[in-house]
């Protein structure tokens, strides 16, 4: 067993999900490499950071990320921070020769994403961007069915990722609602997942036309404490500078047509990440809120038997699930992070490049960039890739 020393930057939601994955991976996916939780960084008081380190089993904590990425004893740097920090942290870590894991979207702009890709390729390190929904077993099964030709020629791809967590006008101005921290709103946060899944399952997106809406244009300022980015003290309201929703149409390289929607104003949809794919021989549908189920319509079946069937993707033959539980014992959101860390460690062990990596991250960023250009030009825009 060889230990891989990890430094995690980010101690909130994603920091907790990644910490859990590092703790679990070797228990369920034992391999030659085992992550060692060396140090956690974050924007927090010393006490809060130390408490998070103890809670999730990190050996040390350090508020100074620049000091940490330079440490000689660190092999992997995991960037789980708000988007505006991805670029400086990834460049510094790559220049220090560290393998990189970075939360999605890769960056806040296409230019930043391209610089990050150049830095990791120049450094010759492994790099992964955490579009974790690719590692839902039902989605990995969908990929297998498509690769086996079970859908035939693809005509349509629909990607709708709906949430509702900021519908209350009293919800404060957090960092995700400010462009300088998040880059964009629904588009970059959840539309990025929809774009990555589409390019993973179907084909590259070549051109788009879209529009973006901000329904609530200012929100209460709150002091969310030392651990939160974007927190503003005092009273009054601040301007929302990102989209609350984005819709766009897309053309794919394989000639199929795409429809995309990402919003945080779909009441009742808590994390409703969905896709539908329609081909000449079959169709697929998937909804994260029923993440273990894949709807499959086989158009080649005899007429009387034609219809959607629900595949419960928990059989040992389905990707990843055999490492967890017997058939029917479903898995959850946190398992996708464990699958990602397992695959990343396997790539380190076998000297392979993980997927999706920063090159895939740039391809998603190029789609987001084209959508934002279209929202301004009000016309079709080409996706300017890597
Ligand atoms: C908020 O929209 C969020 O936490 C996203 O940032 C994650 O990528 C998604 O998995 C869940 O929702």
Image (cartoon, grey):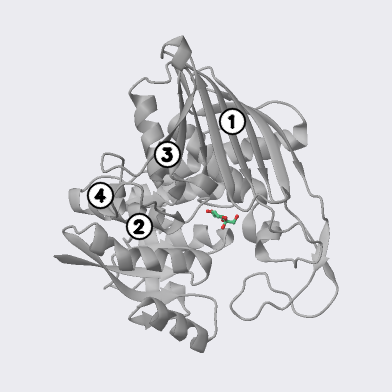
Is 145 on the left-hand or right-hand side of 237?
Answer: left
Alpha carbon distance from label 3 to label 1: 14 Å
Mark 4 or 2 closer to N-term? 2
Q: Dot 4: few (<14), some (14–19), or many (≥20) neighbours within 10 Å?
A: some
Pointer 2 residue Cβ closer than 8 Å to ligand 1: no
Q: Is residue 29 above or below residue 117?
A: below
From where the camera sits, is residue 272 visible?
A: yes
Residue under pointer 4: 347
x and y, in percent, of residue 344 in the image: 30, 53
Mark 4 or 3 closer to N-term? 3
In this rendering, which labeled residue sits more in front, label 4 or label 3?
3
Q: Residue furthest left?
A: 1
x and y, in percent, of residue 80 in the image: 48, 63
Quarter of the image where the N terminus is located: bottom left
Q: Residue furthest front?
A: 304
Do labels 4 and 2 touch, CB within 8 Å?
no
Picture disc at residue 158: 1
Residue under pointer 3: 139
Mark 3 or 1 closer to N-term? 3
From where the camera sits, is residue 125 visible?
A: no
Do labels 3 and 2 touch, CB within 8 Å?
no
- Write the residue at 31% across / 60% down: 97
Q: Secondary structure at mark 1?
A: strand
Mark 3 or 2 closer to N-term? 3
Determine the image quadrant of residue 224.
bottom right
Q: Secondary structure at mark 3?
A: helix
Is 158 on the left-hand or right-hand side of 301?
Answer: right
Residue under pointer 2: 338
Q: Is residue 272 above or below residue 55?
A: above
- Write the residue at 49% across / 42% down: 362
| Ligand 1 falls in quadrant | bottom right
């Amino acid at each position: 067993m060889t230990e891989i020393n990890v430094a995690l930057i980010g101690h909130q939601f994603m920091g907790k999900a990644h910490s859990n994955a590092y703790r679990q991976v070797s228990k369920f996916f034992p391999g030659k490499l085992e992550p060692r939780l060396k140090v956690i960084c974050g924007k927090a008081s010393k006490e809060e950071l130390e408490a998070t380190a103890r809670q999730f089993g990190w050996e040390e904590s350090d508020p100074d990320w620049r000091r940490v990425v330079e440490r000689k004893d660190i092999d992997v740097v995991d960037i789980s921070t708000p988007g505006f920090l991805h670029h400086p942290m990834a460049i510094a870590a790559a220049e220090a020769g560290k393998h990189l894991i970075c939360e999605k979207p890769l960056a806040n702009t296409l230019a930043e994403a391209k610089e990050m890709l150049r830095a990791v390729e120049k450094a010759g390190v492994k790099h992964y961007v955490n579009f974790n929904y690719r590692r839902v077993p039902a989605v990995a099964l969908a990929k297998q069915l498509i690769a086996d030709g079970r859908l035939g020629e693809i005509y349509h791809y629909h990607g709708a990722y709906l949430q509702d967590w900021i519908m209350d006008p009293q919800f404060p101005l957090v960092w995700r609602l400010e462009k300088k921290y998040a880059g964009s709103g629904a588009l970059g946060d959840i539309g990025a997942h929809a774009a990555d899944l589409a390019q993973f399952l179907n084909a590259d997106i070549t051109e788009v036309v879209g529009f973006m809406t901000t329904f609530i244009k200012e929100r209460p300022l709150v002091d969310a404490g030392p651990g939160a980015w974007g927190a503003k003290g005092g009273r009054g309201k601040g301007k929302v500078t990102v989209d609350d929703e984005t819709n766009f149409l897309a053309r794919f390289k394989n000639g199929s047509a795409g429809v995309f929607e990402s919003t945080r104003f779909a009441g009742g949809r808590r994390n409703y990440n969905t896709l539908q794919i329609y081909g000449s021989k079959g169709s697929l549908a998937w909804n994260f809120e029923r993440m273990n189920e894949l709807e499959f319509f086989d158009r080649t079946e005899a007429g009387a038997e034609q219809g959607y069937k629900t595949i419960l993707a928990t059989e040992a033959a389905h990707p990843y699930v055999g490492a967890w539980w017997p058939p029917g014992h479903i898995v959850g959101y946190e398992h996708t992070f464990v699958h990602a860390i397992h695959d990343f460690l396997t790539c380190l062990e076998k000297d392979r490049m993980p997927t999706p990596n920063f090159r895939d991250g740039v391809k998603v960023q190029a789609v987001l960039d084209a959508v934002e250009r279209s929202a301004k030009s009000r016309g079709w825009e080409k996706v300017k890739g890597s």
